[in-house]
Amino acid sequence: MSVDLSREAYIASPGRKLIIYPKSRHMLADLYKQKLVPAEEAVKIIKSGDNLVLPLGCGEPPALVEAMAGRRNELEGVKVHQMLPLKKASYLDSSMAKSFRHVSWFTSGANRQGVNEGWADFMPGHFHQYPGMFRDFIRPDVFMGMVSPMDERGYFSFGLSVDYTSTAAAGAKIVLLEVNPNMPRTRGDSLIHISEVDYIVENEAPVLEIPIPPLTPEDEIIGSYIAAMIEDGSTIQLGIGAMPNAVAKALHNKNNLGIHTEMITDGMVDLVEGGVVTGRKKTLHPGKIIGSFAAGTRRLYDFLNENPMVEMYPVSYVNDPYVIGQNHKMVSINASLEIDLLGQCASETIGPRQFSATGGQSDFARGCLRSPGGKGFIALHSTAKKGTVSKIVPVLQQGAVVSCSKNDVDHIVTEYGVVKLRGKTARERALAMISIAHPDFRAELRDAARKMRLI
């Protein structure tokens, strides 16, 4: 391939094309106009049997998705691959399952019913593995995503959803982009050039916002326990949900924290604006907040827009346990649904029913074990169903999936305390887990542990 060096060039992440773009802004504007079509026109390129990929959560392009759903009577067997839909699109319905087979990597209220009833599919995996799926197993025919407006050099930004999005777009035969001025422009490896795009659709709808979940007294107690164990100068990862938000709230008196996380949240904005997060002590990407996707309120999106402190990268990098471990004093905080006496965490299923997914929980648990001075925390309330069911159990429910292995668990936290399981025997683990169970269930757990010959 011969390259005209009188033109500017950009080489993106491995696997992306070499992009040669015109020097003239007029040429870029003309190219944009040529590719600009209504959403209904753009989705005509989708064929029956295609593998179609959508971004995670807030990166989903609503106009393109609804236009695609409008072709339900013309299409059959389109596989729609997506992690964590945060809004129930019209195609996520059993009546459209013949036209669009949803393939989920993380279930939510939008697709959980379909997975558990069998008209949608679930694909297990660690989050850092998903970009590789598009190289090795799933060949995307069509990618549809939402981006910020094009800059003067012809680049759009994937904004809130870089994760697997940039890899899927790079490997897709057809790329459809929905340009939205409300999508924040983020830095890092978040760009796609107009020459990589087949059709452009414009939309000015507000970007989906996720309200901050209210905190319970138990959440706040758990948050205070974990915060007390986080040293100044640590780098933190916070998972999704109320308990990680409670930890963020409890970190107000810390100094020089850093952030290396899959998900950037509103609580992290508070830590930056409060002077708690500076990144000065980070051993990897010092001074930078490293993330892969974001979901929250408009305040978060405005904070991310053109913020030089924040860099977004594919999850194959951000969630790689080897990369995570290069952060000294790395701390991860995640949640679970049920944990047994040895520390096996069922964080994604209730018995055999899929509730969420492994996500990055195991990635960060393993990464923290590699980190000098690293600490991993898995948190849960001690009970469910208004105190009638213990979430610490002798053995996991039949059919439950182990999301985080007992070999990767470090600390477990409930509102009754924190225990360190790493380095402990099975007997010591069982006694430790019983000590942080709800008092009403401790005798029952001790009896079960004796029958299992654990104590």
Image: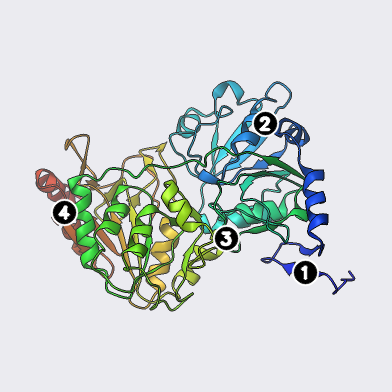
Judging by the rendered image, the residue that carries numbered circle 1 is 9
- Callout 4 touching callout 3 (CB < 8 Å): no
> Dot 3, crowdedness within 10 Å: few (<14), some or many (≥20)?
many
Looking at the picture, how far across and down is residue 317, in whole percent?
55, 65
Q: Which mark is residue 405?
A: none
Check whether the beta carbons of the residues at disc 1 and disc 4 lie within 8 A of each other. Answer: no
Drawn side of residue 313 relative to residue 442, left or right: right
The residue drawn where x is 19% and y is 48% is 218
Name the residue: 16% across, 54% down. Answer: 436
Q: What residue does disc 4 label?
A: 434
Q: Which is closer to the viewer, label 4 or label 2?
A: 2
Relative placement, left or right, of 196 versus 416 is: right
Side of 385 relative to 15 (left or right): left
* Badge 4: residue crowd in 10 Å (few <14, some 14–19, many ≥20): many
How many angstroms separate mark 1 from mark 4 (CA)? 60 Å
Q: Quadrant of residue 18?
A: bottom right
N-terminal-most mark, 1 or 4 = 1
